[in-house]
Image (cartoon, rainbow, N blue to C red):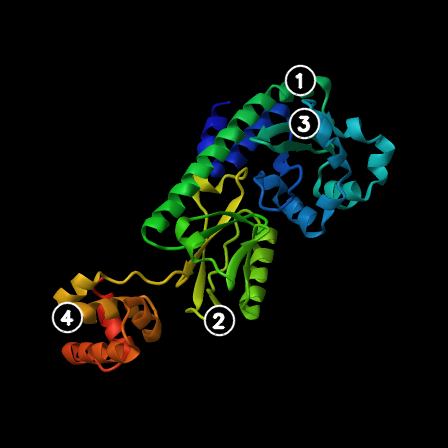
Amino acid sequence: MTQLGQAALDPAAWPEVMESICRAVGATAALLLQSDVRTSDVPRTKSIEEGTRHYFANNWHESDPRAKGFPRLMAGEVVTDHDILTPEQMRGDPMYNEVLYPFGFHWFAGIGFWAESAAWALTIQRTAREGPFERRDKRLLATLAPRLTETATLSTAVGRVALSGMIGVLDRLRQPAVVLDRQGKVLDLNTAAAAGLDDDIRIANKRLVVRDKNAAANLDRLVSMIRAMPESAALPTEPILVRRSRKRSVVVRVLPVDGAARSAFLGARAILLLSNLTPPQAPEASLISQALGLTGAESRLVSLLATGMPIEAAAKDLGIARETARNHLKAAFSKTGTHRQAELISLVSQLG
């Protein structure tokens, strides 16, 4: 199936791929499910959209009787309802009666495949009129398993490369970035983010943890939204302010993951931009001296102050007395026509 090659590069192609598989086997709907991570933002056909929302919103994924067939799926077997349940069990099962039958689905077939080391299944649904899956259907579906594994593994690799490129570009712009997966866990971060982590903002057990209680509550809400978010939903755009004890506050902004990086098998869902996480990089002292007419000593002090360093710490770093540093600052005010340190730093930042 040539469409599988397209899906490896473009995650948005998966619904159409599954539509084609449904047509080939006389089925109505299909969706992808991971064995150990069940979230609602998985690729599926439009025909099962409403049923999928109901399935996850009411936590049926936690008690689906068909899940016990997953080991057989991953052993290479195409599994149907009759391989797991008797007709009597199906008629009496709450999940069948409250989820599948009301949405018109009566018969199921699953194909196991791998995305690197992660176990996945393509689940296909038929209506009562289409009838149960027969042996010839299972033989046909079994031929898809190797291709699905190949496609999913390639999609994961392509997504990882695309995601690395995205946060790498942000790194070159000195913009700290943290990637969250569909469970709200940290999937990746760039060097700028790693360099700025401290006791106020850190990563523990693959979670972004902040000391600021208000910010922590806002991040928890964001993670809950990501976990419950369907595939096509938009991420919240409201920034999150994280106050730190001894450093400037950090502003967290949320960006969606798009394109190849949004591979269902990689699971990347959001990029968090952490502004002010690391001190700003001030222009070199020699540039400040040339542009503003300051002496070397004055320029070196101003360069440190422009990174957010307090004047006392800057004096210590330069090996000069605090009073000497204050005299340098006053001279810089006089030469630049500024009157406050913030005003001087704003002027210097324009040189960068």
Task: Point out the tag, 4 or 2, that comes first from the N-terminus.
Answer: 2
Label 4, on which residue?
Answer: 295
| The C terminus, quarter of image | bottom left
Q: Is residue 244 left or right of residue 110?
A: left
Which badge, 4 or 3, comes first in the chain's sequence?
3
- Answer left or right for 139 relative to 3: right
Task: Give whichever of 289, 166 is nearer the camera.
Answer: 289
**For mark 1, what is the residue?**
139
Q: Are the two marked residues, 4 and 3, in contact with CB atoms closer than 8 angstroms?
A: no
Q: Amino acid at mark 2?
A: Ser
Mark in the foreground, 4 or 1: 4
Q: Disc 3 residue type? A: Met
Q: CA distance from mark 3 to mark 1?
A: 16 Å
Q: Earlier in the sequence, mark 2 or mark 3?
A: 3
Q: Are marks 3 and 1 in contact (CB under 8 Å)?
A: no
- Residue at horizontal 44%, vertical 60%? 253
- The Cα–Cα distance between marks 4 and 3, rounded to whole angstroms, is 71 Å
Q: Residue furthest bottom?
A: 339
Asked where in the image residue 91 lies, by quadrant, the reply is top right
What kind of element bears circle 2? loop
Q: Relative to 105, say whether 230 is above or below.
A: below
Q: Residues within 10 Å of mark 3 (few under 14, many from 20)?
A: some
* x then y, percent, for residue 117: 59, 32
Q: CA distance from mark 2 to mark 3?
A: 50 Å
Residue in view at x 54 percent, y 37 percent: 265
Residue 29, numbered label? none
Q: Earlier in the sequence, mark 3 or mark 1?
A: 3
For discs 4 and 3, the disc positioned in front in the rendered view: 4
Give the amino acid type for the residue marked by disc 4 in the picture: Thr
Residue drawn at x 58%, y 21% as measured from the top left = 146
- Inter-mark Cα distance, 4 to 1: 82 Å
Which residue has dot 2 on it?
Answer: 245
